[in-house]
Amino acid sequence: MTQGVAFVTGGGSGIGRAAAVALAGDGLAIAVSDADLDRATETVQLVEERGGQAFAVLLDVCDEAAVDAAVQETVERYGRLDVAVNSAGIQGDLAAVAECTLANWERTLAVNLTGTFLCMRAEINAMLAGGGGSVINLASNFGLVGKPRIPAYVASKHGVVGLTKSAALDYAQRGIRVNAVCPGPIDTPLLRKIAADAGPQGEAMRREVEESVPMGRVGESDEVAQVIGWLASPAASFVTGTAIPVDGGFVVG
Ligand SMILES: NC(=O)c1ccc[n+]([C@@H]2O[C@H](COP(=O)([O-])OP(=O)(O)OC[C@H]3O[C@@H](n4cnc5c(N)ncnc54)[C@H](O)[C@@H]3O)[C@@H](O)[C@H]2O)c1
């Protein structure tokens, strides 16, 4: 018997994958959704190899009907929804405001902010039907402080923090806790792509990123997944509306 049911977006990679594996380890059945079905299926295999229960679902979080259908499929398969982890996200292009294209702005906001909203709406409706739950949104340390040359990402992640606070208040008396996790640089394909895009400067950029963290290193996906697992659990029963940095001290530096 499972200890609950979790729906994870961006579950095919990085933090979403680590969260899916960690929550399955805590006994939850997992819906692993991602825009890349092959990678979501790999995550399901990782869960099953460890004795857990999961299924993969193809999902673009910008597609309203598909979001509703994926959450509904989860409830039909597993009977309820207790936990949601909204990890699907993109970095967008590197460009200061004066050079930021409207296409980059709109795409980044669509995936990171509107996608999170669409998923939360479907997830919270399912949780209301089941009597409560815990929503965990992946914001960023750049949802708390600024960063040059990446305005759409920074704005989208500040938006995710605001959305988290607003939803926490809406459902505080209805059994649903809503929190955000704000990772610093974490060693995932997303971070590796930033270094790769920088070409010959990639190695220097990686060192610069490490030096920007007071702990002097980047984090691992599992270090974020452990905080997600705690927020999902009854151990965090009085915690809602928070935006928790998991960043080696970055935002206080
Ligand atoms: N890695 C970091 O350093 C870092 C730091 C702070 C915040 N974050 C945030 O954490 C989250 C996860 O990041 P990650 O590093 O694991 O990234 P990742 O690139 O490893 O994984 C992101 C996943 O999201 C999926 N995805 C992208 N667009 C999608 C869409 N439209 N619909 C559904 N799925 C989509 C991708 O296919 C991928 O599997 C993101 O929201 C990211 O902004 C990451």
Image (tube, rainbow, N blue to C red):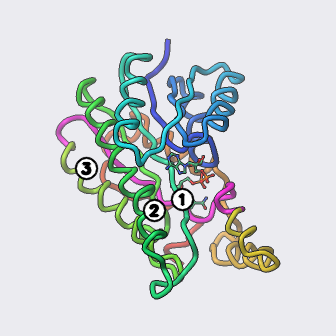
The residue range painted magenta reads: 172-192
Amino acid type of the residue that numbered disc 2 sits on in the rendered structure: Arg
Q: Is residue 241 magenta?
A: no
Name the residue carrying label 2. Answer: 107
Task: Determine if the C-beta at disc 2 is less than 8 A from ligand 1.
Answer: no
Name the residue carrying label 1. Answer: 90
How many marks can you see?
3
Q: Position of residue 91 (x, y in %)?
A: 55, 64
Q: Position of residue 82 (x, y in %)?
A: 37, 29
Is residue 62 depicted above or below 247 in this figure? above
CA distance separating discs 2 and 3? 23 Å
Q: Say few, some or many: other residues with alpha carbon within 10 Å of mark 1 (under 14 / 14 to 19 / 20 or more).
A: some
The residue lying toward the viewer, choosing from 87 and 21, is: 87
Question: Disc 2, disc 1: CB below 8 Å?
Answer: yes
Helix, strand or loop at label 1? It is loop
Name the residue carrying label 3. Answer: 167
